[in-house]
Image (cartoon, rainbow, N blue to C red):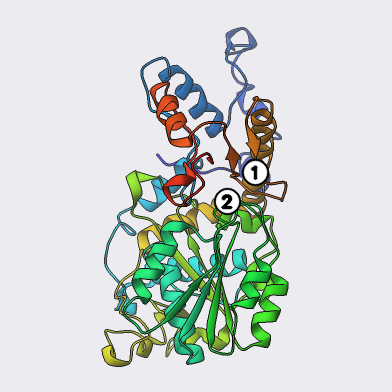
């Protein structure tokens, strides 16, 4: 049977019905000489501690690599309840809920997901999800162009290089000017960034934390861009939003990100979850499904797909995007994860990430020849400079069962010794 926890108030209510003063008193009819004084068991452990125990036992076998990889997807702990709830037959479907009269449960879950994303990012409106973080960023570029009527995008150097490639692909045949600021691990790109913003700029793309893990407050950049009529798109790491200044607090116009870290396993690269949030002023330009809450003709609360005239299945030639589905099941997992963790739980996860990052930096600094590339605040990952080629070191460590960070030379010329 399913386990349902009882609150102290519920326990008290049940004891009152039984006429017992305490749970212990229920065992009074059993003679004391027949009772077991103790079970000789260790103290209870949390789900995470039990899982770690069995991982250590299983680790005696030849197992998977010890992972230190990052770069956009992360191996965070996922509570077992996420799998149990997301795998229920009521939710486990690829069906898009076009018929609200038979889809209220699914629509309500998506609506609650949207609300969770808004709370996390500090924005006003969220859609029902997009394919992944990269496509969400590309959709945001098209959204900004439609909203401003301008044809030029400026992209900061701290953007995930995979996302940069995707944006280039999306904009290549759309008569859109794309200016990329050179990547730098430690230098502030503000002067170059602001020099690139002109009266024809539709949007500036930022990332927080950056691909190199650096945390920044972009409020001044946002204000300067708005002064020139440009929108600001920020790609974010959702776990970091529980401890960092939110995009909404910075005045950002469109927020996108990869939601994989919110209860979705790595799964060899997917499926993942792209999220997008924006302001009320831009909601009619936002791509993808949008679930709204209303009242039916009987005055009861109901959930529906709203503002559908934006979408290609209604008016293909005037649609804001050609996306015709979403990642509803992954979005459900993300919502279950956020609901289980709560604000305090998400903050605790973020603080653990910060503590472990600091510890790793401290230990790596003790290795002769290894240098941490920045003294700026970082979250979850950071860049080190090695005395040897990073790719060679990665290959040797993999032979020893360790998958270290990404060699930056794969993405950036001149960074062959950076990891």
x, y percentage for residue 108?
Answer: 44, 70
Q: Nearer the viewer, mark 2 or mark 1?
A: 1
Q: Quadrant of the N terminus?
A: top left
Residue 165 figure quarter: bottom left
Left or right for 251, reference 325 = right
In space, the residues marked 2 and 1 are separated at their CA atoms by 10 Å
Judging depth in this view, the residue of 272 and 116 nearest the camera is 272
x, y percentage for residue 171?
Answer: 37, 76
Residue ID at (34%, 45%): 267
How crowded pointer 1 is (Cα within 10 Å; few <14, some 14-19, many 20+) is rated as some
Residue ID at (32%, 75%): 323
Judging depth in this view, the residue of 52 and 15 nearest the camera is 52
Residue ID at (41%, 20%): 58
274 up-or-down from 230: above or below: above
Residue 212 is labelled as: 2
x, y percentage for residue 77?
Answer: 51, 40
Judging depth in this view, the residue of 56 and 196 nearest the camera is 196
Which residue reaches farthest top?
33
Residue ID at (30%, 55%): 89
202 up-or-down from 116: above or below: below
How crowded pointer 2 is (Cα within 10 Å; few <14, some 14-19, many 20+) is rated as many
x, y percentage for residue 43?
Answer: 62, 21
Mark 2 or 1, nearer chain start: 2
**Residue 299 visible from this viewpoint:** no
Circle 1 sits in a helix, a strand or a loop, which is it? loop
Residue 271 figure quarter: bottom left
Question: Dot 1 corresponds to which residue?
Answer: 373
**Residue 413 visible from this viewpoint:** yes
Decide: marks 2, 1 in contact (CB < 8 A)?
Answer: yes
């Amino acid at each position: 049977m399913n386990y349902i926890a009882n609150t102290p108030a519920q326990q008290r209510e049940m004891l009152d019905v039984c006429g017992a003063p305490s749970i212990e008193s229920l065992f009074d009819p059993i003679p004391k000489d027949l009772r077991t004084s103790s079970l000789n068991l260790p103290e209870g452990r949390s789900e995470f501690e039990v899982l770690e125990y069995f991982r250590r036992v299983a680790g005696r076998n030849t197992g998977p690599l010890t992972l230190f990889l990052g770069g956009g997807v992360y191996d965070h702990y996922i509570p077992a309840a996420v799998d149990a709830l997301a795998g229920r037959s009521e939710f486990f479907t690829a069906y898009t809920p076009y018929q609200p009269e038979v889809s209220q449960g699914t629509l309500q879950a998506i609506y609650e997901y949207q609300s969770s994303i808004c709370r996390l990012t500090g924005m006003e409106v969220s859609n029902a999800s997009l394919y992944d973080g990269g496509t969400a960023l590309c959709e945001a570029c098209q959204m900004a162009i439609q909203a401003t009527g301008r044809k030029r995008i400026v992209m900061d150097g701290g953007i995930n290089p995979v996302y940069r490639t995707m944006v280039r692909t999306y904009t290549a045949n759309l008569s859109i000017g794309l200016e990329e600021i050179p990547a730098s691990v430690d230098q502030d790109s503000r002067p170059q960034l602001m020099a690139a913003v002109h009266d024809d700029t539709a949007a500036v793309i930022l990332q927080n934390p950056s691909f190199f893990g650096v945390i920044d407050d972009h409020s001044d950049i946002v204000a300067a861009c708005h002064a020139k009529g440009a929108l600001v798109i920020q790609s974010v790491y959702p776990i970091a939003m529980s401890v960092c200044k939110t995009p909404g607090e910075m005045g950002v116009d469109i927020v996108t990100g990869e939601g994989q870290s919110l209860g979705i396993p790595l799964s060899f690269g997917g499926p993942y979850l792209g999220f997008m949030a924006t302001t009320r002023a831009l909601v009619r330009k936002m791509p993808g499904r949008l679930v709204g809450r209303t009242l039916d003709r009987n005055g009861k609360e109901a959930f529906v797909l709203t503002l559908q005239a934006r979408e290609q299945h209604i008016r293909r030639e005037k649609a804001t995007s050609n996306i015709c589905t979403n990642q509803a099941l992954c979005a459900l997992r993300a919502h279950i994860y956020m609901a289980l963790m709560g604000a305090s739980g998400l903050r605790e996860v973020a603080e653990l990430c910060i503590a472990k990052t600091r510890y790793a930096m401290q230990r790596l600094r003790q290795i002769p020849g290894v240098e941490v590339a920045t003294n700026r605040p970082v979250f979850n990952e950071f860049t080190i400079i090695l005395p040897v080629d990073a790719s060679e070191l990665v290959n040797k460590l993999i032979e020893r069962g360790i998958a270290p960070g990404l060699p930056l030379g794969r993405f950036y010329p001149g960074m062959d010794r950076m990891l």
